[in-house]
Image (tube, rainbow, N blue to C red):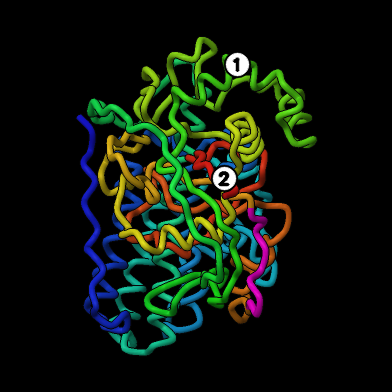
Amino acid sequence: MPTPITPLPRRTATSPADPRSLQERLQAVRALSAQLCHGLAPEDMAVQSMPDASPAKWHLAHTSWFFEHFLLEPRLSGYRPFHPDYGYLFNSYYYTVGAMHPRPSRGLLTRPLVADVLRYREHVDSGLARLLEQRADGPELAALVTLGINHEQQHQELLLMDIKHLFSLNPLGPAWRELPAPKPARVAPLKYLTRHGGQVSIGHDGEGFAFDNETPRHPEMVPAHAMASRPVSNAEYREFIRAGGYRSPELWLSDGWATVRRESWDRPLYWSEDLETEFTLGGRKAIEADAPVSHVSYYEANAYARWAGGRLPTEAEWESLAAEQPVMGNFLDQGRFHPAPSNVAGLTQMYGDVWEWTSSPYTAYPGFKPLGGSLGEYNGKFMANQLVLRGGCCVTPEDHVRASYRNFFYPHQRWQFAGIRLAKDA
């Protein structure tokens, strides 16, 4: 039987500096990371399927190192690091902190054992509890704890992405969990919603948590345009394939066509050659025709949009529409762990199910200032050669997403739950 996901406590209007609400949230998020590994064997948790992915035990250790390095060592009197070498093993990319084990070689770390990593987490959790009991009312500490919580939620999604990719390479086709049976839903016809042009404001509005790359809020001009009422479905993408989409160089960006030829792409990641099944976190399943297509690269999304007579939206177009909608959808909390169809006739699935590629490069907003110190490496240094995705997906924690949230990946990457929403010029 699948292990149910314990819902996280909902965010409330309580001040983030309230030690009770902050500690409750921290404990729940930390517990969920371990819960997502229930059912995995130690062998499952030690392997790295590709350089972009990380072993499950590395995610558990790295998120603990983040709290240890940025909170416990500088702020908890008498704190002793769990192991003197863990900073080297589990630092990800903070070069101002010190040297780190090479990312492509994380799967070679048979030691520490999974049991050691779990003890490490307990050690860090104990220190965090003591720190919050002593100093949780400080706004600077509360802000750092909140950043650490959101950092861990990012790794919860990465953890599931990486497990799925790892299991997909196994000829036995193992399942991470038994997923719920699909709920029949006839997808509504795709329609375009007209949007008037003009000045819009995008970026975080200052209420609640946001990453530094969501700031500052600023005006942008958008032309009149139209946005699709829902994401592109599997059935619609399958028609693109059958129409020769992967054999038509005129549809592709130059780098995209080179990638298609080099990698021999002819379908989304995880789809079978006959276009009838796909690998999921529950093993191989029949493709749900009306569910949003997922695991497509920016190159594929762009080519499909050209074939369909549309384009990808800019992030300003996307955010200005999403900001008018409540944050609700098929997230990790719902326990489906796979994109689901929707039969809503109007605008739907702006949040959850699949991250939606935009045509916007991941760059700094006007007046952007990264966080101070080593935390300034968190987002700003990646602002080159990547594209922005919006909206969250079926393995994103629900309260981790907002209209201004900016995810980013390289255009060739597709192991993330990325899909397509079309736009058109008016």
Q: Magenta span covers which residues?
A: 360-368
Q: Residues within 10 Å of mark 1 (few under 14, many from 20)?
A: few
Residue displayed at 43% across by 48% down: 193
Secondary structure under the numbered disc 1 in the rendered image: loop
Q: Main secondary structure of the magenta part?
A: loop
Gap between marks 1 and 2, in whole Å?
21 Å
Residue placed furthest toward the top: 274
Please indicate whether residue 73 sits to the left or right of residue 230 in the image. Answer: right
Quadrant of residue 233 within the rendered picture: top left
Report whether residue 64 is seen.
no
Task: Measuring from the top left, give residue 230's x and y in whole percent.
Answer: 41, 41
Residue at disc 2, secondary structure: strand
Q: Is residue 361 magenta?
A: yes
Residue depicted at x 66% and y 53%: 101
Disc 2 marks a residue whose amino acid type is Lys
The residue wearing badge 2 is 424
Q: Looking at the rendering, which quadrant does residue 84 occupy?
A: bottom right
- Work out whether 161 lies above or below 65: above
**Residue holding disc 1:** 243
> Which tag is nearer the camera, tag 1 or tag 2?
2
Q: Is residue 331 above or below residue 24?
A: above
Determine whether, in the image, residue 183 is placed left or right of residue 176: left
Whether the magenta-drawn stretch holds residue 105 is answered as no
CB under 8 Å between callouts 1 and 2? no
Quadrant including the N terminus: top left
46 versus 155 height, above or below: above
Please tell me which residue is depicted at 24% across the width and 69% down the height of the picture: 24
Residue 394 appears at what percent x and percent y? 37, 43
Q: Looking at the picture, tell me which residue is in the foreground, 373 or 354.
A: 354
